[in-house]
Image: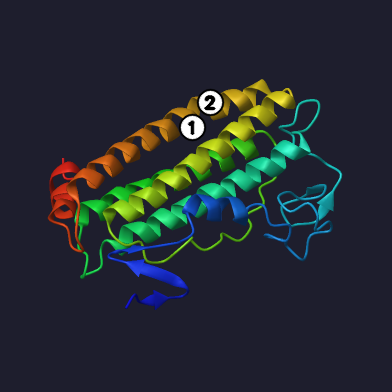
Amino acid sequence: MAAVLCSAVVLGNRVNNRKDCGEYFNSMYQKDDINLVPQDDSPHQKWRFEGNYDYYGNKTDQPSLIVMGQPMDADLESEINMQINKELFAHYTFLSMGFHFYRDDINLPNMRDYFKTASEEEMKHANMFIEYLLKRGGQLKLNPVMNPCRHHWGGARMAMEDALALHKQLLQSLRNLYDLAFEKRDPQMADFIATNFFGAQTDRIKQLSNYINTLRRRTSGRVPLGEYQFDKLTLGD
């Protein structure tokens, strides 16, 4: 008799009908009520502050001295703050993945190291966006970071498939931000995004695709020997 867990059917070491991490990412950032901060004067501006604030948090008419001419477009400021949140969500997710493989009943040390490195990379990306936002005279608004799409990641292939789906959504989000920068006639921001992020995301997507296809060929059964060999030989190199 098939076992049923949380309305999902468990098949071998996989879970059928589980929600894809890319779908979770999309649905999460499309909610109307996400990350509202009650003390904001305008709760409809979810990803930016309404007006300028001094370093005590008081409203002020004095813009940043960095600003030359028109301040950063409000839509761009909002989208950068949202992108920072997305990068932090990815950091949070890959951190969860990494330490999942540190469990004593899994013990794949190179998988742990791979996702720890990916987590550190996403934190680095978030910091780069924060520094750029402030360099341009924008205002940083750090909102709550949502939970990862799950807390148990299965085997190597399942985790890497989730990571691939998330990286694809991050790349699409960066493309949308890049297009918005051009639409708002901000070529400096467009150049910042293209130079620092497109290549890294594309390389990571290609790498994960390679690993997933290798695992598909090597793994079978509930506790596949190929997964151990993949961790030891492929990631160990």
Label 1 Cα crowd, 10 Å radius (few <14 / some 14-19 / many 20+): some
Task: State the SS at label 2.
Answer: helix
Locate residue 24, reporting x and y percent.
54, 56
- Residue 12 horizontal side relative to residue 49, left or right: left
Q: Amino acid at mark 2?
A: Ala
- Residue 151 horizontal side relative to residue 100, left or right: right
**Image quarter of the C terminus:** top left
Q: For the point 71% across and 32% down, which residue is it?
A: 66
Q: Amino acid at mark 1?
A: Phe
Vertically, is 22 above or below 10?
Answer: above
Q: For the point 76% across and 34% down, which residue is it?
A: 73
Residue 116 seen in the figure: no
Locate residue 113, reporting x and y percent.
26, 51
Residue corresponding to mark 1: 197
Q: Which mark is residue 99?
A: none
Locate residue 21, reporting x and y percent.
48, 54
Residue corresponding to mark 2: 194
Which one is in front, 110 or 23?
Answer: 23
Label 2 Cα crowd, 10 Å radius (few <14 / some 14-19 / many 20+): some
- Residue 130 horizontal side relative to residue 218, left or right: right
**Image quarter of the N terminus:** bottom left
- Is the C-beta separation of discs 1 and 2 under 8 Å? yes
Q: CA distance from mark 1 to mark 2?
A: 6 Å
Residue 146 seen in the figure: yes
